[in-house]
Image (cartoon, rainbow, N blue to C red):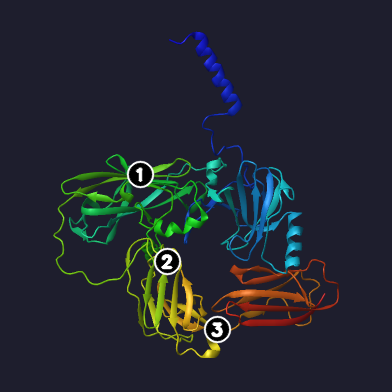
Amino acid sequence: MESHDTMWKQAVLAFVALFLFGSANPDPYPDDYFDSPLRIPLLLSGSFAEMRSNHFHGGLDIKTQGHSGYGVHAAAEGWISRIAVASGGYGNALYVSHPNGYMTVYVHLDRFAEPIASYIKALQYEQETFEVQSFPGKDQFPVAKGQQIAWSGNSGSSAGPHLHFEVRDEQTSEPVNPALWGFDITDTTPPRIYRFKVYAKGPDSIIRLRDKVSGGWRTLGPGEDAFIELIRRNGSIVLQRVDRIEASGTVAFGVQTHDFHEGSNNLLGQYRIDLEVDGETLFHSELERFSFNQTRFLNAHVDYAERRSSGRWVQRSHVLPGNEFPIYESRNGGLLDVMEGQSYDLRYIIEDVFGNTSGFSFEVHGIASPDPALSDPPEVHIMRHDEPFTWRGSSFTLRAPEGTVYDQITLDPVSVPSPASSRPIYSEMVRIHQADEPVHNRYQLTIRADSLPADLREKATLGMVGSRGTLSWAGGEWDGWGVTSRLRSFGDFVVTTDTEPPSIRPLNLSSGKDMSRSGEIRFRIRDDFSGIGHFRGSINGDWVLFEYDAKYALLRHRFDGRLAPGSHEVRLEVSDNKGNVSDVVIPFRL
């Protein structure tokens, strides 16, 4: 037995070690390190890992009461390590590096504080471009915790005034859920669960659902799925109409759920989803952090076809074979092999980042497997997630790398007569699978265009055919045999051309107008197909800064004292992505 002196010495040593080195398991996200970037209540219009088109949201969208111009403050001491200006995407953005190894990002800003603003404007004039990026040194723009660095805005691909705020691990560039850092966001509201989905996944799987009102049965065969509606009754979430689920073979599940918090009606994302079977984990997902180069795996995380057809975000509780997003822990990929005569107790538990939970339970009863079909299977062509795929037809060629799809799909590309269109078409229409199947890595499609005149080859491009026969730009260049493009969606495609230049419309300027009482010159620029590619504005032959807001198709030059009173001439040249050019020259006075 240890002596009292020995035990006392061990206790002292343990205390000294704790004092010198801290806890053996320190909190990786201390609540007191970062301050709020805004001096208004934090109400969210978007949460971390909220589901968006083709990606998970990388930060918090903080409401700014419908207005731009709130002061944006550094969340902690550090230095500005990156400054970016873009017409879309993040718009005006600042990146602040911190001594703890993390970086905070401030996005969709209206304008920068000095001396950052003057530094960036000088860089734009030096490079003669609106869109710029800069990576200042550690000592160039140091900031203190709480120092104002910008004003909130609506720049870039923003749907309305707000601040997009991120916390990133600087070493990996991975965004981390900012809510883990203890920002003052009030949330005692549990997630809302609307319905769940059952999938017959195996080649011989069946699912039977009994309606408790009519007593009738609905049967799902291999590859089919169905929703089961939920309702809250007596404080619990229960199945609304289905009172018995029977199955045979391999089945899987998905759930439609969203989170909310006080003061906001916006649909927010979940933090954890757990599906248990007989008390053990079948599927678990947790969105603490992710990598931007993996965020497109959202299209495998959700039921992509359901999203396209109904707009519902259904999160799969099973992992598709080609889904490499590292947020899952599962048994058998979340698939449940149902055996005849056995019953399975399943429970969903949905949790938000503040610890609020919701859940519901259901049972699956195993039944006998159907007799296997005896007919010969049709000849099919298979595209797999882990193999490249090539198809050569008489009028087109398709080359897909490994990782193009998330699961095995049956592919039978065909060429059919082209539809009627207001745009010229120079090929047959090539049908590549279905648009409700997601594409991860780009595949290459070349379509032969024998009827394309030689003088139009530099204007040739692929067009994607919509449901009503309308064409949208799908990129591409003439390659000597046809038009080749690298695509990230399946669908119907044709060869067309873009020969029309962009339109330029002055909004507050006319020939000879006195602009001395105006603070700026504004133009609206649009292109009807391939999109705006480049623009250049000059006054009296010298390049001048025109700020471009792509979502409003708006160009703006602000007078800043560089022009003397008198007569001047502004020239604006705008080209699209196929090299068609428009320009206007307008004299004015100051």
- Kindly tell me whether residue 467 is visible in this rendering: no
Q: For the residue marked with disc 3, what is the amino acid?
A: Lys
Question: Mark 2 — residue?
Answer: 401
Q: Position of residue 515 (x, y in %)?
A: 79, 74
Q: What residue type is labelled 2?
A: Pro
N-term mark: 2 or 1: 1
Disc number for residue 267:
none
- Dot 2 falls on a residue whose secondary structure is loop
Residue to which mark 1 is pinned = 359
Of callouts 1 and 3, the N-terminal one: 1
* Mark 2 → mark 1, Cα distance in angstroms: 40 Å
Percent x, y of residue 75: 64, 45
- On screen, residue 107 versus residue 436, left or right, reads right
In terms of depth relative to the viewer, which is nearer, 517 or 1?
1
Q: Which mark is residue 459?
A: 3
Q: How crowded is mark 2: few (under 14 residues within 10 Å), some or many (20 or more)?
A: some
